Image (cartoon, helix red, strand yellow):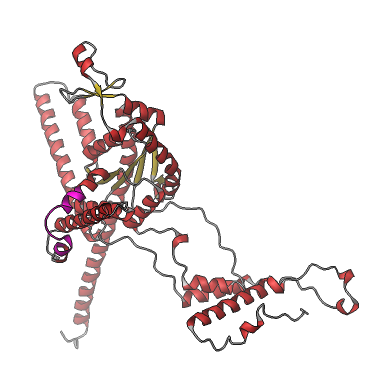
Amino acid sequence: MIPKKTFRHPDATDSLTKPDTPEIAHAHETLAYGELSDYLTGQGVWKVKNVKIDNLRPQEADLEILQAPENNFNLGKLVHHVIDLKFPAPEPPKAPADIPNYLPLKLLSLGYTFSGRKTLARHLRDKYNIHIIQMNELIEEAFQLSLEQGDPRKSSANLENAENETLSTRSELREVGYAMKAAMEKGQPISDELYIRAVVAKIKEFYTALSHEELLAEVSAEKAKEEQRIAEVKEKLEAEEAKRKKKKKESASQLELELMSQVQKRKYYSKGWILLGFPNNYDQLKALEKALSGFVPQDELPVSDAEQRKKRADLVVRAPPVEIVARKLISGGIDCAIILDITKEEALRRALGRRIDPETGIMYHLEDNPPPVDQSPLCERLVPINDPENSEATLIDRLTNYDKNSQEMENWLKMFGIEEIGMCTLQKFEGKGPIEQIHAVVDEHLDRLLEYKINWYERMIEEANQAQQRAIEAEEERKNQEIEDARVSPFCIK
């Protein structure tokens, strides 16, 4: 048997049944829960001292030193199941309804300054029909909108549902500009929330949110246009081939065959955006992901009522340990975060080697794009670019700051991706070398991503068509059955 124990604070237990206020009731509950926890786990005053049986006095020799009781895992599993039935888990966070997350290419461009991010963004804009969101330009645009006359809050309130959505998003961006301007006038830094609101407003300005049915209809229309375009190109090439045969000339040239091949490989549904200059640290990246997809890390979600009850029930009987499964890539609001990997020395070399001709405004680089050596007046005119934001001291600070934040950001991005094809959101590419070669490697990855997205759209379209066909067949079967019932039964009332 166990010697009689008392509460740690016996006087405090006298009024457990008659609390005066909710605060006192909560304190009593906490006290009782702490004592129960100590009792069930053998801690505190309930901890069994480590004594030797040989040293016990005769009257104590008959006492049994109790060990921890065996746990009934089946009972614990049943208790957890009952709690889950009684207290359903809350719905996980969802993406905002007005965010166009259906876009096939949602990209970030990260890395050192002068790693080639802007050049790559312009290339991707031209090839994949996506928009560039440059953070500095976006902030300037928000400030300019805030200088326009009129109160943005009034203009937003007066917008009706039938109004143009672009006007609404411009008004939203103007409100962000007002908030940024107010913060700067007070000498306060611009909050991350305002940066993210500006990014989201710009995305919504480019694209509107679509329902599942609207998305499938849009993709189907784009596919029909592309098929028609391919058919026209084929018809043109076949007509030219027929003319060659008439004149007994050679068959189609290699250039035309390559053109036809490129036409067939082209992805017919390509749209999206690429964000430059933001985010710059882990907190901004996490907040941006939440704004785009609604994702919140599991450990940051509020503890549900069911989990609290399970924790308390585990003091009495524990459920089996949770099986550890391999982590899967999470589908997030960013499809690919592109990092062009160069060294700090290479970034400084590219920045400090720039020169400009003051007469023509043409920029050169002493090593990568030197001026013609046979034009001595030009070489003498060249001067270093006067850019305080990209001075050597400023650049070193920015590069060091990126190094300080990059590891946390990369670890976060490694959690996301497309599990079906094993494609992680974070993608690093070698940033030193011929521009065409770097862009070709990035294109190859994005082509694979785009192909997966288009295949997914087509599967959804096929499933929707099959469901529609099944509905039509079921309706026809119902009508045929009614006709048959009317024919068989003479008493059927039409």
Task: Estimate the x, y position of residue 472 in percent, counting from the top left.
Answer: 22, 66
**Magenta stretch encompasses residue 92:** no
Is 85 positioned to the left or the right of 381 in the image? right
Query: Residue 250 appears in which quarter of the rendering?
Result: top left
Q: Name the quadrant of the C terminus.
A: bottom left
**Closer-to-camera residue (126/213):** 126
Q: What is the span of residues highlighted in magenta in the rendered image?
A: 141-155
Judged from this view, the residue extending furthest toward the front is 186
Task: State the residue at coordinates (15%, 61%).
Answer: 151
Q: In this view, does 233 lie above or below 188?
A: above
Task: State the residue at coordinates (47%, 73%).
Answer: 305
Task: Estimate the x, y position of residue 370 in percent, counting from the top left.
Answer: 27, 19
Query: Residue 110 appears in which quarter of the rendering?
Result: top left
Task: Estimate the x, y position of residue 397 in percent, counting from the top left.
Answer: 39, 37
Q: In this view, does 84 lie above or below 441?
A: below
The main secondary structure of the magenta stretch is: helix
